Image (cartoon, rainbow, N blue to C red):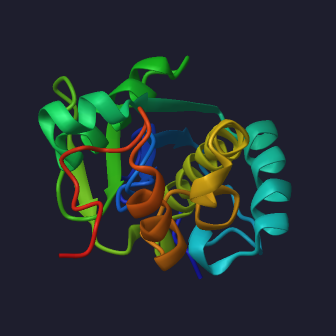
């Protein structure tokens, strides 16, 4: 059973990112503030859900949330500041875009950088422990999937429709055969050594 809050009596935003381990494309993050007493039987870590469940839940999260937003850091920014910093930047951008200002932040994982003066806590596997982080994981994942599906139409050789930009055998073989495109992360190990 996922928990509602880490901080009692504070407006809390849950944050998560998607696309950190990909070889190509932007990294997406979401921030979600849920109602204090919110519960949902299906809400869980996005990796434990089917694509169909994620998209159904996205509609419900967007309808039910007090506030939600998605932030992005580009492949170029990832190459400039590294994937960890770019993931955090995308989370900060999602927090910036919320129309309700949170009073605290909980983040999936073990790394974050202070956001303004707000108290924050990192939670390893937080998307399987807190509802707002699970909700953020679903939004980040589905919005990133939509984005990579659009790119896949432009660059079909990399099989992004299937691998979403992650390092699969087919993706690496396509890089070897066709080279990289402008959306590949040049600082990543794109080919097996």
> Where does the image place residue 71, in percent across and percent down from the top left?
46, 30
The structure residue drawn at horizontal position 43% and vertical position 52%, both measured from the top left corner, is: 16
Residue 168 vertical position relative to residue 5 in the rendered view, above or below: below
Residue 177 seen from this side: yes
> Where does the image place residue 103, in percent across and percent down from the top left?
35, 32
> Where does the image place residue 116, in percent across and percent down from the top left?
19, 23
Identify the image quadrant of the N terminus. Answer: bottom right
The picture quadrant where one finds residue 135 is bottom right
- In the picture as drawn, the residue positioned furthest to the front comes out as 177
In depth, the one of 73 and 8 nearer the eye is 73
Tell whether 104 sits left or right of 151.
Answer: left
> Where does the image place residue 89, in percent across and percent down from the top left?
27, 32
**Number of numbered discs overlaid on the protein picture:** 0
The structure residue drawn at horizontal position 75% and vertical position 62%, both measured from the top left corner, is: 54
Residue 138 seen from this side: no
In depth, the one of 21 and 113 nearer the eye is 21
């Amino acid at each position: 059973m996922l928990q509602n809050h880490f901080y009692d009596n504070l407006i809390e935003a849950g944050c998560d990112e998607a696309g950190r381990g990909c070889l190509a494309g932007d990294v997406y993050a979401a921030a979600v503030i849920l109602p204090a007493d919110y519960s949902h039987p299906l809400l869980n870590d996005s990796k434990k859900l089917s694509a169909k469940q994620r998209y159904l839940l996205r509609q419900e999260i967007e309808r039910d949330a007090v506030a939600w937003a998605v932030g992005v850091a580009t492949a170029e920014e990832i190459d400039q500041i590294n994937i960890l910093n770019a993931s955090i930047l995308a989370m900060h951008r999602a927090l910036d875009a919320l129309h309700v200002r949170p009073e605290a932040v909980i983040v999936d994982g073990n790394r974050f950088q202070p956001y303004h003066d707000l108290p924050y806590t990192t939670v390893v596997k937080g998307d399987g422990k807190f509802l707002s982080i699970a909700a953020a994981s679903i939004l980040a994942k589905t919005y990133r999937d939509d984005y990579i599906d659009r790119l896949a139409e432009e660059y079909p050789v990399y099989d992004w429709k299937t691998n979403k930009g992650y390092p699969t055998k087919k993706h690496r073989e396509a890089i070897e055969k066709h080279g990289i495109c402008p959306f590949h992360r040049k600082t990543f190990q794109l080919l097996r050594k």
